[in-house]
Image (tube, rainbow, N blue to C red):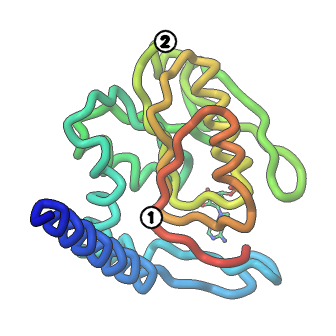
Amino acid sequence: MVLWLCDLQTLKGRFHTMLAVQSELISAIRSIPDYPKPGIVFRDITTLLGNPRSFRRAIDELVHPYAGTKVDKIAGIEARGFILGGAIAHQLSAGFVPIRKKGKLPHETVRIAYSLEYGVDEMEMHEDAIAPGEKVILVDDLIATGGTAEGATKLLQQMGADIVAACFIIDLPELGGRKKLEALGVKVRTLIEFEGH
Ligand code: AMP
């Protein structure tokens, strides 16, 4: 009974810490209405990155479940995924792999088309960036419709990567991106949610 009460207290403590972290991250992000077009609220993480405390907090929270586990590579999606992914790779002593818009990488690449809100685009990674069976975490700042992360996931799976998880600071749950990745068998970790687009 005493033990059970202690567990309950610990759980309560963790829950309050989680809420405090979430509210710190939410207030560190700048929301810009009608950018880049009417109806979209742009979630600008440059204010979070510019604040030493919230930047560290976001990285610590993203890394937390994987600390001490084997992760070979962090794959970051251009461009904000590079900033977060580099810091996460450092924390986990993993390598970093950039996933870029087509035509930016200098060596032989593998490429995949992915859907945007209007139309399609292509992304690439170096053909030798991941060896089959390597444990990889995919990173970007935000998941919305999931088209971008779905493309990156398929590219990594095509290379034989064992995707441990896909991590994002922000989820826009109404747009259903998380479900797209889960349908591909990928665990999704996000820290905070915003309503709408
Ligand atoms: P999606 O492919 O729809 O999941 O869009 C995700 C990509 O677009 C990520 O690289 C995000 O950085 C960017 N993005 C989409 N919607 C927003 C938004 N409301 N605010 C900031 N970035 C966004």
Spatial separation of the CA atoms under disc 1 and disc 2: 29 Å
Q: Nearer the viewer, residue 148 or 22?
A: 22
- The residue that mark 2 highlights is 132
* Res 134 seen here: yes
The residue that appears at 44% across and 64% down in the rendered structure is 191
Residue 24, x across and y down, in percent: 35, 81
Question: Percent x, y for residue 76?
Answer: 48, 43
Q: Earlier in the sequence, mark 1 or mark 2?
A: 2
In this view, 28 is above or below 119: below
Q: Is residue 61 left or right of residue 180?
A: left
Q: From this viewpoint, which residue is outermost toward the front?
A: 1
Q: Count residues near mark 1 (Cα–Cα under 10 Å), then give few for <14, some for 14-19, many for 20+.
A: some
In the rendered image, the vertical position of residue 48 relative to residue 180, given as above or below: below
Q: Residue, x 32% and y 72% (percent of image)?
A: 15
Badge number at residue 191:
1
Q: Secondary structure at mark 2?
A: loop
Residue 99, position as x, y percentages in the image: 56, 38
Which residue is found at the position 31% from the left and 47% from the top?
65
Q: Which quadrant contains ligand 1?
A: bottom right
